[in-house]
């Protein structure tokens, strides 16, 4: 049974805002650090891992473009899983997806602080200062998002331009230092390492679904969600693939693998030291944009589920003046804020790194439900799909489903075990949501 919100959300997201949300949530701090992780895990063959992941996520992007157009309700993956498979699937989707967003925001914050340290050495020596900066970023962006989607969208558009233009321009300029010898040996870890490489890249592609989550705030959602998703995917993929090729060719693999800022190093070698500083600043800007985008998302992910009685009811409340899900934004920020406490205890840093990896797994399962929902709904709801659309849904839904399964496999057994425990831990919570307020027959 669906509830009713006291206030409606505002349709304040234009196509530019939707594209900026998708691109900003994808092209964040991950692209600035991933080349090093890939070089260590798979070598120059990381280029192939990027291409394979891009193909798999094309299917995911097309699934969300299709479902977002047909079911333009706030919540994205939750809406589709519940529509196709019922309350339990919907609950597990929103449970995992919401956790991935709020925990991931803490990870993004720490990634941004890492780049700030490179420009302000005194910050690196002070954990309290780093913690204070992280808190300021989280709560400052929470405040911006509470005040309205339009302000958040304007910031996202500005950050997209400040990030993408110099990143693409300087990496392309660096191509003049490309040396094919740096690509040998191409597969030092063997071709079997591709799955692990793809699993690393998934963190960058998290966010391809962003246009579907604030669906009720998108202008003309039947057109803008699809366009925004596919344009955002195309821009992000162009950045990912071109950057990975140039970094692998400009620097020896061992140098890339040992660098904390591989893109800045490649651009510094190909263009000059000043360009490396520009890239470092760009990484901070990009990370801020990603945090802003996922802050917006964390406030919208639970709204419809809370409305439907499948999540905490308070998270569906809409601010009477700003018409934003202010309670969900504050609660999500509080969880991310508490997670930052791990920075104070060095013995817990490894655990925190693992939590970041876990958030990737928690994002993949909702993608799996969305791909399955596209397959199911295309067969079941024939009035929603033309015959040609049903055939496309079967092709791209199947591509997305198989690709996401492969990404989950590549994330490793340990992450998978913990991810399953998080999934199972939600079952008692689901039982409570669906039985609260009900009494057994004959009870008083």
Image (cartoon, rainbow, N blue to C red):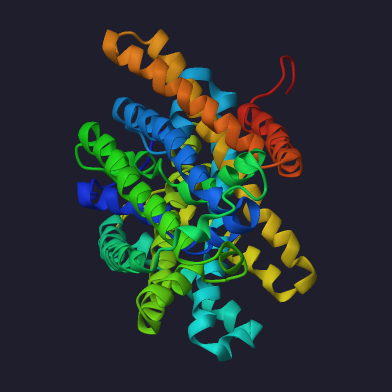
Residue depicted at x 64% and y 65% = 338
In this figure, what is the number of numbered marks?
0
The answer to whether residue 390 is above or below residue 173 is: above
Q: Outermost residue toward the bottom?
A: 122
- For the C terminus, the image quarter is top right
Q: Outermost residue toward the front?
A: 181
The x and y percentages for residue 15 are 21, 46
Residue depicted at x 50% and y 43% = 48
Give the image quarter of residue 158.
bottom left
Nearest the camera: 131 or 11? 131
The x and y percentages for residue 24 are 37, 56
Residue depicted at x 71% and y 75% = 344
The answer to whether residue 159 is above or below residue 216 is: below
The x and y percentages for residue 316 are 45, 44
The x and y percentages for residue 186 are 56, 50
Nearest the camera: 56 or 39? 39
The reply, left or right, for residue 7 in relation to residue 44 is left
Give the image quarter of residue 342.
bottom right
Nearest the camera: 198 or 86? 198
The reply, left or right, for residue 320 in relation to residue 50 is left
The reply, left or right, for residue 394 in relation to residue 333 is left
Residue depicted at x 44% and y 30% = 79
Q: Outermost residue toward the right?
A: 347
The answer to whether residue 83 is above or below residue 314 is: above
Q: Looking at the image, can residue 330 be seen? A: no
Q: Looking at the image, can residue 440 be seen? A: yes
């Amino acid at each position: 049974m669906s509830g009713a919100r006291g206030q409606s959300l505002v349709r304040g997201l234009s196509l530019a805002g939707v594209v900026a949300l998708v691109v900003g949530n994808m092209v964040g701090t991950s692209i600035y650090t991933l080349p090093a992780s890939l070089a260590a895990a798979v070598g120059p063959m990381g280029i192939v891992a990027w291409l394979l992941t891009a193909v798999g996520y094309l299917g995911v992007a097309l699934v969300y473009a299709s479902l977002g157009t047909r079911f333009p309700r706030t919540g994205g993956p939750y809406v589709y899983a519940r529509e196709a498979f019922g309350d339990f699937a919907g609950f597990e989707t929103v449970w995992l997806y919401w956790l991935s967003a709020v925990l991931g925001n803490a990870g993004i914050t720490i990634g941004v602080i890492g780049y700030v340290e490179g420009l302000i050495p005194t910050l690196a020596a002070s954990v309290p200062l780093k913690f204070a900066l992280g808190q300021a970023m989280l709560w400052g962006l929470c405040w911006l998002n509470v005040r309205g989607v339009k302000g958040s969208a304007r910031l996202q558009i500005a950050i997209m331009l400040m990030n993408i233009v110099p990143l693409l321009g300087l990496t392309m300029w660096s191509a003049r230092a490309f040396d094919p010898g740096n690509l040998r040996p191409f597969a030092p870890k063997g071709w079997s390492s591709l799955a692990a490489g793809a699993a690393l890249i998934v963190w960058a592609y998290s966010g391809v679904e962003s246009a579907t989550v604030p669906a009720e705030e998108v202008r003309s959602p039947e057109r803008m969600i699809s366009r925004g998703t596919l344009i955002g995917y195309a821009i992000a993929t162009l950045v990912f693939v071109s950057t990975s090729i140039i970094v692998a060719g400009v620097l020896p693999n061992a140098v890339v693998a040992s660098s904390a800022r591989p893109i800045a190093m490649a651009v510094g070698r190909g263009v000059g030291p000043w360009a490396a500083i520009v890239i470092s600043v760009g990484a901070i800007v990009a990370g801020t944009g990603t945090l802003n985008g996922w802050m917006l998302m964390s406030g919208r992910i639970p709204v419809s589920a809370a409305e439907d009685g499948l999540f905490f009811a308070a998270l569906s409340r809409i601010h009477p003046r700003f018409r934003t899900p202010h309670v969900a934004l504050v609660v999500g920020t509080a969880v991310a804020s508490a997670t930052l406490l791990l920075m104070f205890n060095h013995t817990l840093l490894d655990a925190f790194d693992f939590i970041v990896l876990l958030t990737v797994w928690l994002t993949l399962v909702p993608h799996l439900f969305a791909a399955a929902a596209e397959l199911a709904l295309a067969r079941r709801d024939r009035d929603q799909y033309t015959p040609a659309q049903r055939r496309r849904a079967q092709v791209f839904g199947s591509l997305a489903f198989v690709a996401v399964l492969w990404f989950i496999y590549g994330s490793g057994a340990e992450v998978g075990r913990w991810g399953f425990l998080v999934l199972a831990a939600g079952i008692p919570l689901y039982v409570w949501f669906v039985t609260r307020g009900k009494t057994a027959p004959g009870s008083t």
